[in-house]
Amino acid sequence: MTVIDISPSVMQFLLAFIVVAPLLGAVAALLPAPPGLRGKNPDQAVLRHGVTVTGAVLIAAIVLATGFDHDQPATMQATTDISWIPALGVRIHLGIDGISLPLLLLTALLTFLCALYSYFKLPAGPSPKAFTALVLVLESGTLATFAVLDLLLFFLAFEMVLIPMYFLIARWGGDQRRAAAWKFILYTLLGSVVMLLGLLLIGLKSGTFDMVALATDNGRGLTTSVQVIAVLAIGVGLAVKTPMWPLHSWLPDAHTAAPTVGSVLLAGVLLKMGTYGFVRILLPIAPDGMRTFAPYLAAFAVVGIVYGSLACLALARNGAKGDLKRLIAYSSVGHMGFVLLGIATMTPTGVNGALFANIAHGLITGLLFFLVGAIKDRYGTADLDTLAGATGAALYGRAPRLGALLAFAAVASLGLPGLAGFWGEMLTLFGAYSPAEGLSRPAFRTFMAIGAFGTLLTAAYMLIVVRRVCMGEHTPHSQLSPDDRTPRPADAPGRPTAAGSPPQLADIQTYEAAAWTPLAALTVLAGLWPAILLGLTDPAVQKLLAGGKS
């Protein structure tokens, strides 16, 4: 069933356009604008160009989704297969199925919302031309990662996003941005070198780099020892990007230093590239190797769940001087741990849960980083102790709609039933209860119990954040400093305007509402109607795990 009937050739064009258009748009952004398009403000004109290109890509992705045959989500659609480097057997092979389509839509949506947000709130830094071009190159690389079906093309697309993200952090970031950018690039490049060796090993031993052919073969052309080595090498590179504990330490620094849109794209789409690689490459192509490492992957995943939650609790406590952006970054380590646990079960239930949690994390954490960026702009800091304030008013009293949306995003992140965060975590825990044949049930049920405990820790730190940031911490009048007791004029930020009344902050602006509302609405939609995602992913996952057989 398709929403609208689109010919295969048009579907091919749409997918190719989605991948290539941002790259062409990046080149156009760096060229001098034609006289008629410069307008009165060239900086705004190039930012408007970014909104236009990302908007066109989003429209094309939506049209592609409407033309997608939902009765056959396990079949590759909109495929293009052209020989590129015959000597190496490398082909320009593109296609989408029920696994990649949601990630393609998520990437197109988040990049458009970031471009729209930046048009009104460009981060401090050098040329808007360079900023727009980098965001567009980043989008092209991410979309290509989810669309290509050749191992070497996957590697090229996987690496394509590193340089744009490095410069977004290093040139438009906050404090310690250069150190954070270097840490990001070194970790991911070292992981990628090891991953390339694993991809080459698979291609040379099997005689093809075609991911569809390899998935259909289901590892039968590879010995167990080759699969084990390939999974170890490729898994390290993917685990760095995910990020999996203990290869995660680049992430909190990168998020803390990155500009708002950089954090949204990093959490919303770049982390998904690693987990997508586990599902698209390792599960179907090297199943015996994955079965060998699955218990270790699950163990690292649940350690990451608990570690990320404990780190968030430490940052959230009173007097810890914790940074709210850093806290959300550590929460991503925990949430991506659930994704890895679902993949490690090697069951349809667990892998579907992992894919659902991927999309939910992109929506919810993308919204959280937008909100934290807005709060930092208003207060001038993301320090939790400062945000809690001394008047007891905090966000609910100063910017009530902003406070309410932050509370919504927080409860969605902790997995409240009825919102998107719930289903992914629940399905991964169900998958761990009954893992694939050949995996230890007692071990995975232990991992399930630890993961369930992690959900309680997640609820604890998120509720502490909501209480402190939205409600504030009341300090008795006698303990306030003389400055805090003295009424100040309304234009003095952070001071009372009258005895007992908090100063007002700018509440949600129109452009902020435009950028954030789609994420909040989709979080509710996916929570109330999970079949909208599971109906796409389940048949494709079933086929993937069955070795290409539906």
Image: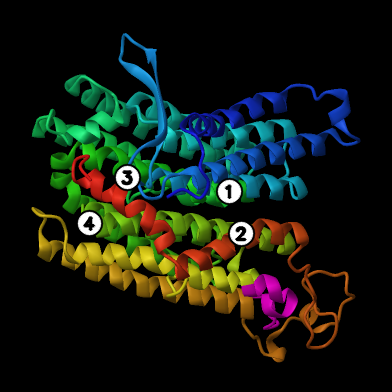
Judged from the image, the secondary structure of the residue bearing numbered disc 3 is loop
Judged from the image, the secondary structure of the residue bearing numbered disc 4 is helix
Is residue 413 found inside the magenta-colored segment of the image?
A: no
Horizontal placement of 420 versus 114: left or right? left
Count all numbered tags in the image, as a single digit.
4
Write the start and end of the magenta stretch as one range. 388-404
Amino acid type, mark 3: Ala
- Residue 349, position in %: x, y? 26, 60
Amino acid type, mark 4: Ala
Distance of mark 3 from mark 4, alpha carbons? 30 Å
Q: Residue 55 occupies which quadrant of the picture? A: top right
User: Label 3, on which residue?
Assistant: 74
Tag 4 near tag 1, CB within 8 Å: no
Distance of mark 4 from mark 1, alpha carbons? 33 Å
User: Label 4, on which residue?
Assistant: 299
Tag 3 near tag 4, CB within 8 Å: no
Tag 2 near tag 4, CB within 8 Å: no
User: Label 1, on which residue?
Assistant: 109
Tag 2 near tag 1, CB within 8 Å: yes
Classify 391 as above or below 304.
below
**SS assignment for the magenta stretch, majority:** helix
Distance of mark 2 from mark 4, alpha carbons? 35 Å
Q: Residue 483 occupies which quadrant of the picture? A: bottom right
Mark 2 neighbour density, 10 Å: few (under 14) some (14–19) many (20 or more):
some
